[in-house]
Image (tube, grey):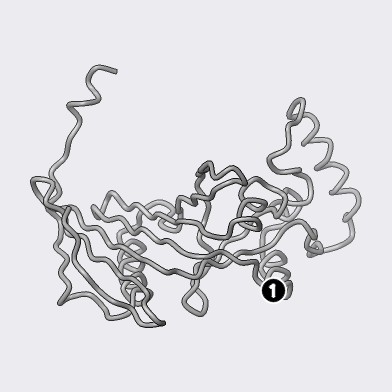
Amino acid sequence: MSSISSIRSEYTKATLDVASVHPHPIEQFSVWFNEALAAQIPEPNAMHLATVNEQGNPSGRMVLLKGVENSKFVFYTNYQSHKGKQMDHHPACALTFFWPELERQVRIEGIANRIDDKRSDEYFQSRPRPSQIGAWSSPQSLVIANRTILEERVKEIEKRFEHQDPLPRPKQWGGYEVDPMMMEFWQGRPSRLHDRILYTKDDNQWVINRLAP
């Protein structure tokens, strides 16, 4: 572990300036996301979701972005999971994308709300059948004695819905959308003098500023 402090890289692949970014952060995100796709980065839609519990303690985990709709970031989860309960009680949350191959990071702070049942139904029933069965089978975030419990639940669900395809969406599962209030685009630069462009929403208008690295 003593060598951790010596790990370092120089970032030299691109630049970022206020004059070159799109006036709307969602459009700028779309540009960067498409470039991440073109670069064939593994799971470019993977994002870190940070929430807080009722005591104000932070909690983080990786989830997958499933769409950007009406300028909001959409993902799906179990409503009874830790993150689901936390967002329902304290909707303020943060998302982070990190694309090291492009030396880029995007930070988002906003408010999470459940999407409507129709959209959750449509997405759930578009998923592969094993994923649908998994959502029914897992009491997400609850303590379980062993993996056998999950495997038995899968068998039960497979039998229950043996002649039904697609499966109905379980009521404890669905989507959230994060309405961004702040978005920061970070481009790695040499000597740690990184480019940071910040968008903040003021009276429904986006204000753009450069931040010191």
Identify which amino acid the numbered label 1 is placed on.
Asp
Count of numbered tags: 1
Crowding near the residue tagged with mark 1, few <14, some 14–19, many ≥20 C-alpha atoms within 10 Å: few
| Image position of 115 with respect to 108: above or below | below
Q: Which residue is mark 1?
A: 116
* Image quarter of residue 121: bottom right
Residue ID at (40%, 61%)? 108
**Where on the picture, by quarter, is residue 106?**
bottom left
Q: Is residue 123 above or below residue 195?
A: below
Horizontal and vertical percent position of residue 207: 28, 76
Name which quarter of the figure residue 140 lies in: top right
Farthest residue to the left: give it: 191
The quarter of the picture where the N terminus appears is top left
Q: Position of residue 20 (x, y in %)?
A: 17, 75
Going 32% across and 53% down the picture, which residue do you hit?
Answer: 99
Would you say 53 lies left or right of 168 here?
left
Q: Position of residue 80 (x, y in %)?
A: 72, 50
Residue 125 versus residue 79: which sits nearer the camera? 79
Q: 75 left or right of 142?
A: left
Direction front: furthest residue:
55
As helix, strand or loop, the secondary structure at mark 1 comes to loop
- Kindly give the residue lying farthest to the top in the view shown: 2
Q: Is residue 92 shown above or below 144?
A: below
Position in image of residue 36 (x %, y %): 33, 61
Residue 72 shown left or right of residue 87 in the figure: left
Give left or right: position of 196 versus 149.
left
Q: Which residue lies at the image location 78% right of the left edge and 29% below the top edge?
A: 148
